[in-house]
Amino acid sequence: MSGELSPIDKAKFVAAKRAVDFVEDGMRVGLGTGSTAAWMVRCLGEMVREDGLKIKGVPTSTRTADLAREVGIEVISLDEAKWLDVTIDGADEFDGDLNLIKGGGGALLQEKIVATASDQMIVITDASKEVEHLGAFPLPIEVIPFGWQTTKSLVEEMLISMDVMGRDSTLRMNGDHPYVTDEGNHILDLHLGRIGNARQLSLVLNQVPGVVENGLFVDICDVVILGFADGKVET
Ligand code: 5RP
């Protein structure tokens, strides 16, 4: 499956390959979204088709659901699963406390719900995502379309009092149109530069009317598996 991969894809692939070692027969598995998570879904699919692994997968986006079905994984809803043994997902940034920024792929809402409903969240990534302080990657927040410009102003005002460097935000676009999430919402990307207190910021952001969820994952991730282009893996 790994064939001739670019160095970055090799790093993502080896991290995904190590993560699927945690998956056992009978498990209910949260399936993340993004290019790294897609490797994990392909690896699990191979184990289902070739080794007879029996799992049920709960995808975190329509993209992942389509891929999971395509590779042979049985897909169920979170409400059918009720609780998950493990979720494996990518991240846009992670720090030394295993706090994350997620949502670069626009799936942060389902990703956070699914990861929170799991015994364990494993993040798979390459070394470029490791940071000392979160915030260089723009923090995505999911907002409802109604009054999004007002929500944007309220969020920017709120950021003045928070321990962050920047406070500009941009509406994520898909060509000429606002990006629309699986739940029919929009995404604001917050250009913060550096986040001092991720837990506090996450709580405060979710208090702003119109904000559905933010991409800070605080105390949710249990393990980060780092892949490298030379095939090495670190946990
Ligand atoms: C999607 C996410 C992804 O996990 C994150 O953007 C990382 O993606 P990739 O593995 O493609 O770098 O949070 O909402």
Image: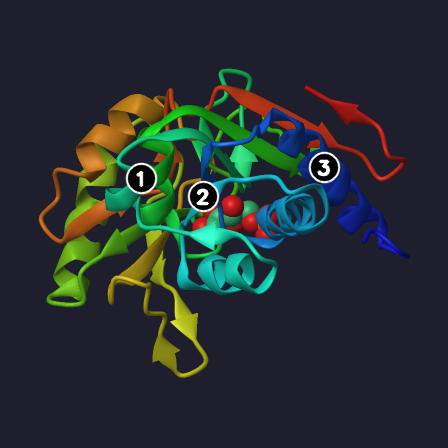
For the residue carrying disc 2, how many other residues have a C-alpha within 10 Å: few (<14), some (14-19), or many (20+)? many
Where in the figure is residue 108, as x and y percent of width and height? 37, 47
Residue 17: which disc?
A: 3
Residue at mark 2 to residue at mark 3: CA–CA distance = 18 Å
Foreground residue, 54 or 94?
54
Q: Please name the colour scheme applied to the rendered image.
A: rainbow
Q: Is residue 164 visible?
A: no
Where in the figure is residue 170, as x and y percent of width and height? 36, 60
Mark 1 or 3, closer to the camera: 1
- Contact (CB < 8 A) between labels 1 and 3? no
Looking at the image, the residue that sits furthest to the top is: 97
**Left or right of residue 31: residue 162:** left
> What amino acid is at disc 3?
Lys
Looking at the image, the residue that sits furthest to the bottom is: 176
> What amino acid is at disc 2?
Lys
**Left or right of residue 5: residue 218:** left
- Give the mark nearest the N terminus, 2 or 1: 2
- Give the mark nearest the N terminus, 2 or 3: 3
Mark 2 or 3, closer to the camera: 2
Q: Which residue is mark 1?
A: 81
Badge 2 element: strand
Residue at mark 1 to residue at mark 3: CA–CA distance = 24 Å
- Contact (CB < 8 A) between labels 2 and 1? yes
For the residue carrying disc 3, how many other residues have a C-alpha within 10 Å: few (<14), some (14-19), or many (20+)? many
Q: Which residue is mark 2?
A: 56
Where in the figure is residue 182, as x and y percent of width and height? 32, 63
Where in the figure is residue 219, as x and y percent of width and height? 38, 20
Is 51 placed above or below 104 here?
above
- Contact (CB < 8 A) between labels 2 and 3? no
> What amino acid is at disc 1?
Ala
Is 22 placed above or below 13 here?
above
